């Protein structure tokens, strides 16, 4: 039995080679996000909205280095700092 995680099990299970639980959850979350954005773009295409739709994606100031799952190098710091991954 796995501990409770904020990522669906199917995405967590895609990265069995990652032993660090925090990194594995993070990678699973990125994979889930990537898949859903792909579904959104495909839906726009199927409904002939692709050419007249602007899709913007914004991140929120660097990786969460405090989790140990990300590394913003060579940038400074990350979330919750004055640098925010600059």
Image (tube, grey):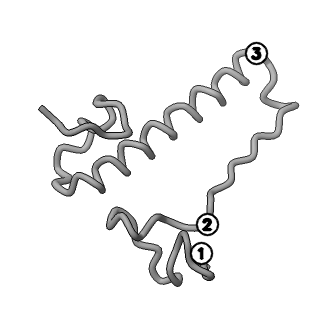
Quarter of the image containing the N terminus? top left
Q: Looking at the picture, how far across and down is residue 82, in whole percent?
A: 62, 81
SS assignment at label 3: loop
Per the image, the residue denoted by label 2 is 61
Q: Looking at the picture, how far across and down is residue 15, in whole percent?
A: 24, 44
- Residue at image position (36%, 64%) is 67
- Which of pointers 3 and 1 lies earlier in the amino acid sequence? 3
Q: Is residue 44 left or right of residue 7?
A: right
- Quadrant in which residue 58 is drawn: bottom right
Tag 2 and tag 3, C-beta contact below 8 Å: no
Tag 1 and tag 2, C-beta contact below 8 Å: yes
SS assignment at label 1: loop
Badge 1 crowding class, 10 Å Cα cut-off, few under 14, some 14 to 19, many 20 or more, is some
Q: Residue furthest left?
A: 1
- Is 47 situated above or below 5? above
Quarter of the image containing the C terminus? bottom right
- Is 15 situated above or below 50? below
Q: Is residue 62 left or right of residue 44?
A: left
Per the image, the residue denoted by label 1 is 84
Badge 3 crowding class, 10 Å Cα cut-off, few under 14, some 14 to 19, many 20 or more, is few
Which of discs 2 and 3 lies nearer the camera? The answer is 2
Q: CA distance from mark 1 to mark 2?
A: 5 Å
Residue 47 badge: 3
Q: Is residue 54 left or right of residue 31?
A: right
SS assignment at label 2: loop
- Residue at image position (33%, 35%) is 11
Question: As rendered, which of 64 and 39 lies closer to the eye?
Answer: 64
- Residue at image position (31%, 40%) is 5
């Amino acid at each position: 039995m796995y501990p409770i995680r904020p990522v669906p099990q199917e995405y967590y299970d895609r990265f069995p080679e990652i032993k660090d639980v925090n990194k594995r959850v993070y990678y699973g979350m990125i994979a889930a996000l990537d898949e859903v954005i792909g579904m959104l773009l495909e839906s726009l295409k199927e409904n002939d909205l692709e050419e007249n739709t602007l899709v913007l994606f914004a991140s929120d100031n660097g990786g969460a280095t405090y989790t140990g799952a990300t590394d913003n190098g060579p940038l400074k710091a990350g979330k919750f700092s004055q640098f925010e991954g600059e």
